[in-house]
Amino acid sequence: MLLAGVATPLALAGSPAGADQVATLQQRAQYIASEVQAANVKLTILDESYLLAKGRVASLAQRVADATRAIGRTQEALEQSRSHLREIAIEAYVTGGASQSLSVLFNGTQQTAGMQQAYIQAASGNLNESETTVLINQRTLAIERATLNHTEQIAKANETAISTDVAQAEALHAQLTNEEAHVKGQLAVAVAAAQQAKEAAYAAALAKAATAAAAAAAAAEAAQQQAPPPTPPTQAPTLSPPPESGDSAGQIAVSAAQSQRGVPYVWGGATPGMGFDCSGLTMWAWAQAGVSLAHGATDQYYEVQHVSMSDLQPGDLIFYGNAYLLYHVVMYIGGGMVVQAEETGTNVMDTPVPPGAYGAGMP
């Protein structure tokens, strides 16, 4: 329904251009621009959700592998236990306790058969108990592995679904961008037509304004000749520039991030000179300072030492979102400015600190 509404053409050919058409096209352009922004936000959130789902699948795959190895170890222990106990029992029966390990039990002649039978029963009992314990452990591990396999399948399906959502969101973003350009083109044509229709009125108004301006200028010149010389204006305050790179880890990270200014935003990207997403840029920049961070805003938030927004230092990370999902992260560079990979269609750049931060932290 949204695309159908956006794609409906506004027929201008053959109709007079006027203020109503210009206002309508301006409203349409503003509406589409808001939809483009919403699509960018959705892509940013999907980026973070995909990274979390991908990590979940990798973790489950490792747990399945660990459970499989544990089952193999219990089976091996069972086979060794069976073999060892049977060898002892057979030796006791055949040799009548001649082995050194059983010499104490089988050193008589009259009671040999009874003692052999008693030992075999004891060995059999020990075997059954050991076997039962191992089989219980195997069963428990098998159930755990089956549960992990099922959970892993669900996680993989979720990862695939998110990838599909990303493709649909990117297609919507592209179509909205095209429609926005089309409406802006129509708006330019309508504005030009309206200006042409009012050209005579504009010319008269300009002439009148020129006459009034000349009179005002003459009056101002006369007043200036009679007025005392103006007081020199005070020098306007200047904002201090972001701090230069130094030896601290934070400043090294800032310098690395700023070296990528102009590199395009790429969904899931973390490659210098090629493309970054928000957390990919902060991960790579801090790696240049020797600090390892995960690729994901949510994971990075729980890896850093949280600080107050009033105590920010160069290199600190500022996070956006909520307690359930942090979908954007930027790097503070000082002077109320940050460096960030903001959204699809933009490049890595310095900007003022975006409003609405959830929290901040120092890696």
Image (tube, rainbow, N blue to C red):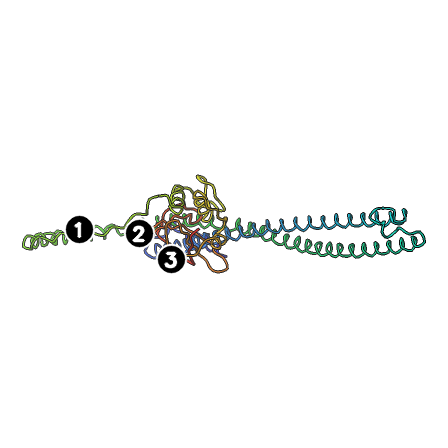
Q: Position of residue 160 (x, y in %)?
A: 58, 50
Q: Is residue 91 visible?
A: yes
Q: Residue at x 84, y 56 (%)?
A: 122
Which residue is tagged 2? 194
Of badges 3 and 2, the one in the foreground is 3
Left or right: 55, with 70 as reference point: left
Q: Is residue 3 visible?
A: no
Q: Amino acid at mark 3?
A: Met
Front residue of 178/289: it is 289
- How far apart, in angstroms, are the residues tagged by discs 1 and 3? 55 Å
Q: Residue at x 59, y 49 (%)?
A: 58
- How far apart, in angstroms, are the residues tagged by discs 3 and 2? 50 Å
Which residue is tagged 3? 309
Front residue of 273/344: it is 273
Image disc number at residue 137: none
Image disc number at residue 207: 1
* Label 2 SS: helix
Q: Amino acid at mark 2?
A: Ala
